[in-house]
Amino acid sequence: MQQQSTDMASAAIEIKVRELVVRERILTFTALTTTFPDCRWVSLFRALNHLEKQRVIQLTPLPGDYQICLTEGKAVRAAAAPRGD
């Protein structure tokens, strides 16, 4: 039961991050943590990792931070409801 609850929470975080990235196009991890102050960093990185694997975003290391960019050509797909994969 705990795993299902964790999966649902992760999916909810991923949806919120996806919506923000689609709206902003480019932001930093620091800005993301400010936007979601109640989320643990590990939860945000999991969501970002999953979105990067789906090729929705691209993470680029910066000195002391990460840049999060919407992947070109993914704006329409990213704005659509996420699939259950």
Image (tube, rainbow, N blue to C red):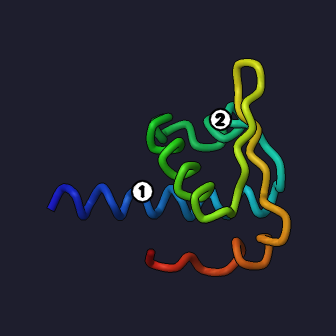
Q: Residues within 10 Å of mark 1 (few under 14, many from 20)?
A: some
Q: Describe residue 3's horizontal placement relative to residue 48 as left or right.
A: left
Above/below status of 54 relative to 42: below
Q: Describe residue 62's horizontal placement relative to residue 3 as left or right.
A: right
Above/below status of 43 relative to 9: above
Q: x, y (%) of residue 22?
A: 76, 63
Determine the residue positioned at 82% across, 54% down.
24
Q: Give the quarter of the image for residue 80.
A: bottom right
Distance between the alpha carbons at the discs numbered 1 and 2: 18 Å
Q: Residues within 10 Å of mark 2 (few under 14, many from 20)?
A: few
Q: x, y (%) of residue 60?
A: 75, 38
Above/below status of 7 relative to 68: below
Q: Describe residue 5's horizontal placement relative to residue 72 as left or right.
A: left
Callout 2: SS: helix
Q: x, y (%) of residue 9?
A: 38, 58
Q: Which residue is mark 1?
A: 10
Q: Give the quarter of the image for residue 67.
A: top right
Determine the residue positioned at 55% across, 37% down.
37
Determine the residue positioned at 45% across, 37% down.
42
- Quadrant location, the C terminus: bottom left
Q: Which residue is mark 2?
A: 34
